[in-house]
Image (spheres, rainbow, N blue to C red):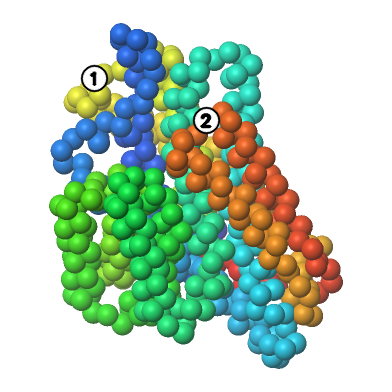
Amino acid sequence: MAAGAVAALHGRDPAVDAARVAALVVVVCAHVLLVTVVTDPGTGAVSNVMVPTRYSWFWWVSWIVQIMPLFFVVGGFASAVSWSRFRERAVRDDGDTARCASATAAGALWVRMRLLRLAQPAALLWVVLAAGTVAALALQVPAGYLDAALSGIGMHLWFLGAYAICLAAAPLTHAAHRRRPYLTMGVLLGLSAGVEILRIAVDDAWWGLAGLAPIWMAIHQLGYFRADGTLGRLRPVHLAVIAACGYGAIWVLGSTGAWSTDMLANLNPPTVSLVLLGLSQACLLQVFSGPLASAMRSRTVQAIAWTVGSRPVTLYLWHLPVIVAVMAVWWLAGGPQPEPGGARWWLLRIPLTLLCWVCVLIVVRMLGRWEAGAVVPDAMVPRVADGGTATWVPVATGLILMVAPAVLEIRFLLSSWLVLGGAASYLVAVVLLRRVPGAGRGRDPEHWRSTARVG
């Protein structure tokens, strides 16, 4: 295991890999704490209780466990490195830009490869959920049980839409960053602020959904500042001050009443507080890059990182369905159900967390090949080197099909009709991303894939 980990980590930023794995661990453990199936003794209704959110101290803990901005920061770093290598390889190997594919075609190919790595494992999840929903409906499972299960299972699917948008925009946002980094960030922050002003003015939180793209793109953009060395040129004390200012600004916004100091409440719809949190996390990642890189030199740590992080998309997508399934089986089997939030409840989280991790890793082991196999078929790789076209039309259509179910999940929560629609959308998206018009002869497909694999 360790030998495979060493090979996989060669040529990568070890601090970024450590941060990604640590973030995955935090997400899984946090969701174990946030899923507790309970039955109302009066009505018999089944619901989920997010126990930690009941405590008055949860708001500051949320600043630690709300790790999703860090995912986008390291994702932005990976996108910048991957796209830069892809673009530079195309120009270098083909002599000049007139002889290689246009920037538009190269961008479409890179985005198609990256989106497929997200869409293919996600499509499997949607199809499995759809099959389970159809079976539950056929067996006449009570609607309350089904709705409770689906709403819990789908809490994390917003990520698919937000991250797909960031990936699709990466060639454009990275080009803008190379020319005017601070102006580009300023535009994204301005758009985010505009949405926030609208949300506050109309007093409707759901207008904040319009900020899904600019807010997460701004956080993704922070990773570019790590990739180009901007953050690395700052002294640790300066980075620490910036991080502290970010946290301070979150508190100031929360004190106005228009925002929450609870970063879980700021997640969906997203608010500018997430950008501040992402800035703080990006700075702290830079501060601790040395210790993180040192830790990653340990064979034991590398083995753990490989076990947890070798199939990050699969682990992220399946961890919550597995946790919900484990908790549901525990409840149906009549396992101990101590009072939520009591001492016995907290103690019970320890074995349940271990049980959930075992089940999650087994599922990832079984289904990880869907992520590993998310590559464009050789026969379908466009003629990049010969100036062939890789149209954006199917890529853009696939993007819409990936984003729409995620946005609907944020607004309405996961339901039986949305599961069925999401499965259809993602299946079509995968087909479109794997088969793009303009495919044909060209340079060895592996030549281009190798430059798009970073991160």
In this view of the protein, can residue 34 be seen by the observer? yes
Q: Which residue lies furthest to the right in this view?
A: 441
Check disc 2: other Cα within 10 Å, few if <14, some if 14-19, many if 20+.
Answer: some
Judging by the rendered image, the residue that carries numbered circle 1 is 339
Mark number for residue 18? none
Q: Give the image location of residue 30, x and y in percent.
A: 33, 41
Check disc 1: other Cα within 10 Å, few if <14, some if 14-19, many if 20+.
Answer: few
The reply, left or right, for residue 49 in relation to residue 221 is left
Identified at 69% across, 73% down, the residue is: 105
Q: Which of marks 1 and 2 is in front?
A: 2
| Mark nearer the N terminus (1 vs 2) | 1
Could you say which quadrant of the image residue 239 lies in? bottom left
Q: Nearer the viewer, residue 404 or 262?
A: 404
Amino acid type shown at disc 2:
Ser
At mark 1, the secondary structure is: loop
In this view of the protein, can residue 298 be seen by the observer? no
- Rendered position, 319 above or below 140: below
At mark 2, the secondary structure is: loop
Q: Give the image location of residue 79, x and y in percent.
A: 51, 68
Q: Give the image location of residue 421, x and y in percent.
A: 62, 37
The reply, left or right, for residue 139 in relation to residue 57 is right
Mark number for residue 415? 2
Q: Which residue lies furthest to the front in this view?
A: 202
